[in-house]
Amino acid sequence: MNQPATPERCARWGVYEVELHGPADGNPFTDVDLTAVFSDGEREMRAGGFYDGDGTYRIRFMPDAEGLWTFTTASNAPVLDGVTGEFACTAAAPGAHGPVRADGFHFAHGDGTRYLPVGTTAYAWTHQAEGLRDRTRRTLAAGPFNKVRMCLLPKWYQYNHVEPEYYPFPGSAEEGWDTTRFDPAFFRRFEQEVAALQDMGIEADVILLHPYDRWGFADLGAEADDRLVRYAVRRLAAYANVWWSMANEYDMMGAKSEDDWERLAAVVSEEDPHGHLNSIHNCGPFYDYARPWITHASVQRQDAYRTAEFTDEWRERWGKPVVVDECAYEGDIDQGWGNISGEEMTRRCWEGAVRGGYVAHGETYVNEAEELWWSKGGELVGTSPARMGFLREVVAASPTGVLDPLPSNWDARTGGVAGAYEVTYFGFSRPRFRELPLPEGKRCRVDVIDTWNMTVERVADDAEGTIRVTLPGREYMAVRVVAQQ
């Protein structure tokens, strides 16, 4: 009987791994199938295994409840079939709250803790040299971001003409790839960075496919696509901080039809026993975000000027959380998608927030090393990240921990909790004062918030009725009204 190498315990929402040894001849990636059923006595959950090279097979699982768990394997390889074991699931590690789920128009962790996405994009950071990856980790650890969009596959695009150290398949672009096999070292590198993000409390928004390559990975054909997605999901699904994105700019991948995306999404659903968030990102036309497998809308702006202004409309259209993952990037490159100011990036984030959504960050400042954050990572030099952290504090202070769109005047949007916590944002308007009706029958605190200078000034402690709020005549101001208990 194959004796699995398994730990005796695993923290709730940790990664429990079963290591087995089996056939190394032939092609273990396609010849051998391995699964396991995990049970806590009340439920059964199936997790797929994968070949990790050198005769080693692994099954990863994320227990979501404390207590005793058992498992039994099934395989077409006799030595891997019928292996059993058990382990104790202990309390969650400090700071571990479980995978993020959609919660109405917002998000919460598995234990109910509110999650407010403050996201950024660093598409190819995991495919850079260790020195640059280390700088990226340090930047993320010191910054406000709690979600990173990142490509599973290497990227070949403007400011990113670098060959990675590893590729997903054995072979080469010149001589061809053996897409029936994988290079485990490529995936180990990626999952190590996913784990590093988890240790920092950062979600990994894993983009499974994208159009920007020179190696042929964007057009592998249906069978190879399915194998790649299945293998990746089996390796990564046990990490609590994983989100799935089926594609970045799906509509730029002309070789794939809607049927292809639906088939690939079904593969993810089949192979992910933990039900991580899943979406698909557009360049031009939106995907149908109302599809049942899509948990939230991952949106790129369709208009050069208006982006976050549509957030509340999109909520109503799809009935799901709206994450504007690409509203344009703070930077100074020659393309309109990557040269808005820090002020405009911050404005878009606030505009989306008071409309009940989440607008993400990206940075594309030119430098001699061509190490632009949006692609390779490194250091951040822009002015918007700190302001996004400040916005997160304002949103988190709401009684519900989120902002929802509220009835508003035509020239300034209000979001929050009706009658309890109302934030009116003036954006690029510069009023010297504003008369605001306060929640009827309530005494309120009133704050003037300078969203750019990140200051909060209390202007009233016990106001009621209608209040005239004096403002500085500057852009990017907000007024917060909080009803007294």
Image (cartoon, rainbow, N blue to C red):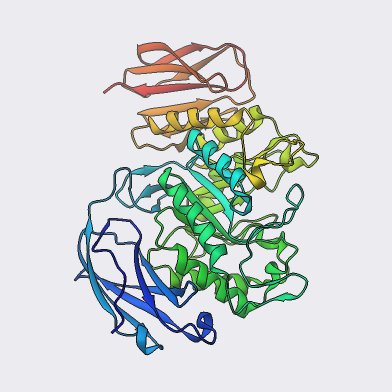
Q: Nearer the viewer, residue 122 or 255?
A: 122
For this rendering, which residue is in front, 383 or 424? 383
Is 289 on the left-hand or right-hand side of 197?
Answer: right
Please provide percent x and percent y for residue 411. Answer: 60, 27
| In front of the other: 268 or 216 | 216
Residue 344 as seen in the image, left or right of residue 51:
right
Question: Looking at the image, which residue is at 75% across and 34% down?
Answer: 332
Where 1 falls versus 472 (above or below)? below
User: From this viewpoint, which residue is outermost toward the front?
Assistant: 54
x and y percentages locating residue 154 in the rendered image: 65, 59
In the displayed structure, 128 sits above or below 231; it is above
Q: Residue furthest right?
A: 334
**Viewer-side residue, 268 vs 399:** 268
Tell me the quarter of the image containing the C terminus: top left
Q: Quadrant of residue 33?
A: bottom left
Residue 244 in view (yes/no): no
Name the image quarter holding residue 80: bottom left
Residue 253 seen in render: yes
Figure quadrant of the N terminus: bottom left
In the image, residue 323 above or below residue 226: above
Q: Position of residue 483 (x, y in %)?
A: 33, 23
Question: How many marks can you see?
Answer: 0
x 65%, y 78%: residue: 178
Judge left or right: residue 23 versus residue 342: left
Q: Position of residue 319 (x, y in %)?
A: 48, 54
> Residue, x 61% and y 67% (percent of image)?
168
